[in-house]
Image (cartoon, grey):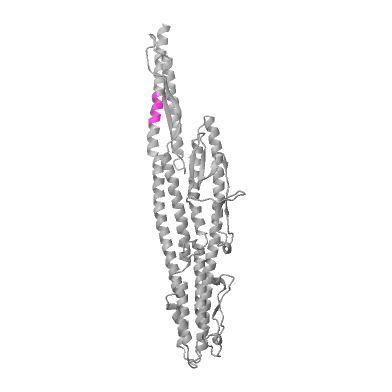
Amino acid sequence: MSSFGGLSTAYTGLVAARKALEVTGQNVANANTEGYTRQRVDQSPMAQSVLATYFTQSSVGDGVVVTGVSRLNDAVVDARVNSTASSAAYWNASANAASAVETSLNEPGKNGLSQVMSDFWSSWQQMANNTGGSTAPAQALNLISQGNLVASTISAGYTAAAEAWTDARAAAASIVTTVNATAAKIADLNTSIRSLTAAGGNVNGLLDQRDAAVTQLAKLTGASTRGNADGSIDVIIGGNTLVSGSTTRQVALSGAGDFSAVASTPVKLAWDSPTGSAVSLDGGELAGRIAALQPADAGGSGTGGVYAEAAKAYDDAARSIADKVNAVHETGTTSAGTTGLDFFSYSATSPAALTLKVVPTSLAGIASADGTKGNLDNSVADRIAQLGAAADSPNAGWATYVSRVGGQSATAAARATTATTAATSATDAQTSVSGVDLDEETSNLVMYQHAYQASARVINTINDILDTLINMGAR
C-alpha cells in the first residue's frame, strides 16, 4: 500500500467512525421516544482494488465502507406484540363492559332490585297481617309506594342499560373513524417508504411510524400484516385486505343506531361500499365493543350483548312480577266487594320495564281478601306475599341473572389480566431487542470516538512520514 493509499484507508475509517457516532447520537436523542427502534451502522471492509506487484506487494484492502444503517428489531417479536395487544384489548373491552353492567345493578345493596322486591313482598305481608282499623289506609299507601318503587327501579335499570348501549355504540363509531384514519396513514407511509427505498434513502424513521400504526390497528381490530418486495406492507383484518400498498378500503359501523332496534338490526362492522358486506374481526378493542352491543340471546342463555341482556333481565322481571301478582290479585276482593282487578299494568307493545305501573291509588283498589271469609280476611294478600319465596318467583329469576353477569364479569376480568400480562411480556421483549440502552450507547460512543481518533492518528503519522521523505529529498 502506498502512503497515499494509506491516507485513503484512514479517511474511510474517519468517515465510518463519524457516521457511527452520528447514529449513536440519534439513538441517545430518541432514548425516550415511543416507538423508536435503535439503529446501528453496517460496515464492510473494502476489497483491495489493485493486484500486488513487485513494486506494490501489500495485500491489505482499501479501508472500510458504510453499507447502511439497520434497525435492530425482531419481526417475530414485533408480530407477538401485535397479537398479544389484540387479545388484551379485546378482553379489556369485554371486562369493562361487563363490570360496568354489574356495578349498575347495585347488587347486593339496599338500592338493588332484589332488596326493593323483598320490601314489596314484606308490604303485602303487612297487609295480610292487618286486622282492619285506622292503620289499613296507611298500610295500603305504603304498599302502593313500594309497588311504585319496584316499577321505578326496573325502569331506571332498563334506561341505564339502554343509555350505556348508546354510549358504547358512539365509542365504537369513534374507533371506526380511528381505524380508517390509521389505515390511510399506513398507505401514505407505504408510498413514502417505497419511493425513498428506490432512491436509496434511509427509511428507518418511516418504518418506526408504520410499525406504531400497525400496532395501533392490531389493538383496535386484531389486524395482521404481509410484506411486499417493494418495502410496502398489506394490512389484513378478518382475512380481508384493509391496506394494499398505497390503497386502502374504508370500514363503517352499520346496524341499529338506537337501542330499540338492536334486536332487529344488530350492530356490525362492514365495508363502506355499495355491497357493505360484514367484516369479521379476529380480535381487538372494536371486536369486544361490538360483541357487547349485540342483542340479547333469544334462547335465554344470557350469552348476548351485556347491555341488551341487562335490559332483557329488567324487562323479564317487570313482566314476571306483574303477571304473578295480577294472577292472584284478580281472584281477590276489595273492601267494596269489587273483584277481577289488576295491581300492575304494562304496555303490550312497548318494553314492560318502561311502562310498568301500579293501578290502585288507595286502599279501595287493593283486593286483599277472597270474599268468602268475612271482613277481616286478607288471605289473598298473604298469597301474594308468599310469591317472593316461590321457586319461580321474580326474585329467583333476577338472582339467576345477577349471578350470571357476575360470573361473566369475573371471567372476562381474569382473561383480561392474563392477556394483559402476555402483552406486557411481549412489549418488554420488544424493548429489550429494539429499545435504546443508554449504558450501551455510552460505551459505543467511547468506542467510536477512539476509532475516529485512531484513524486521525494514522493520517497524522502518514503525514509525518511524507513530510520527512519530502524533506530528505530536498537536501
The foreground one among 364 and 110 is 364
Picture coordinates of residue 50, whole percent (x, y):
42, 14
Looking at the image, which is closer to me, 131 or 20? 131
What residue is shown at x 52% (from left), y 29% (from top)?
200
Give yes or no for residue 452 being in the magenta stretch.
Answer: yes
All told, the count of numbered labels is 0
Magenta stretch: give its range: 447-454
- Residue at horizontal 42%, vertical 10%? 470
> Foreground residue, 295 or 110?
295
Q: Is residue 465 above or below residue 356?
A: above
Q: Is residue 224 above or below residue 192?
A: below
Query: Where does residue 239 sit, x and y in percent of width and height?
Result: 50, 46
Residue 436, visible in the rendered structure: no
How far from the left and from the top, in percent, is residue 154? Answer: 52, 72
Q: Residue furthest bottom?
A: 374
**Above or below — where is 395 with respect to 242?**
below
Residue 79 in view, yes or no: yes
Farthest residue in the front direction? Answer: 299
> Which residue is outermost to the right?
274
Task: Write the residue at 40% across / 40% down.
Answer: 433
| Residue located 49% across and 78% down the image | 324
132 up-or-down from 434: above or below: below
| Residue 415 at x, y percent in the picture | 41, 56
Instruction: Identify the image quadrant of the C terminus.
Output: top left
Of helix, strand and loop, which mostly describes the magenta segment?
A: helix
- Queried whether the magenta region covers residue 264, the answer comes back as no
- Placement of the N terminus among the 4 image quadrants: top left
